[in-house]
Amino acid sequence: MGIQDIVQFFRPETFLIAAVLWCLGKFLKKAPEMPDWAIPFVLLVVGLVLAPIYILLIMETAYTVGAAIVSGLIQGLFAASMAVFGNETLKQALVCRKEDKNE
């Protein structure tokens, strides 16, 4: 399985949903009553709800309802993963950690 096979699973709309989830994650990070450990789970649930709705309402494709829901759940999982992974990658690359200062 090559990279082209993997890329075929991602719909372009997934990147839009990932951007929405990234913004939601930044907002939740600022909320004082939201613990940090819960944010990825909230983003996952929102992604799993938002993606199937997006596919059912916005996409003009020949999806059946069942296929749209399954595809939406997969795309929601991808979008939430991209948002969390992207955020963590940027933090690791750009934020100076205490461990780095001690070296």
Image (spheres, rainbow, N blue to C red):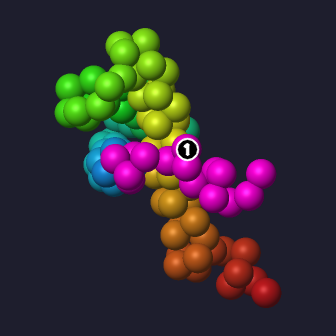
Q: Can residue 33 be found in the magenta stretch? A: no
Q: Which residue is mark 1?
A: 9
Residue placed at 74% from the left, 58% from the top?
2
Q: In terms of image quadrants, where is residue 9?
A: top right
At label 1, counting other C-alpha atoms closer than 10 Å, the crowd grade (few under 14, some 14-19, many 20 or more) is few
Secondary structure state at the residue bearing disc 1: loop
Residue placed at 45% from the left, 35% from the top?
76
Looking at the image, the residue that sits furthest to the top is 66
Q: In terms of image quadrants, where is residue 4?
A: bottom right
The image quadrant where one finds the C terminus is bottom right
Q: Main secondary structure of the magenta part?
A: helix
Q: Position of residue 102 (x, y in %)?
A: 75, 83
Q: Position of residue 53 (x, y in %)?
A: 28, 25
Looking at the image, the residue that sits furthest to the front is 62
Q: Position of residue 42 (x, y in %)?
A: 43, 32
- Residue 44, placed above or below residue 19: above
Tell me if 30 is positioned left or right of 82 in this view.
Answer: left
- Residue 46, placed above or below residue 36: above
Residue placed at 52% from the left, 70% from the top?
90
Tell me if 24 is positioned left or right of 80 in this view.
Answer: left
| Amino acid bearing label 1 | Phe
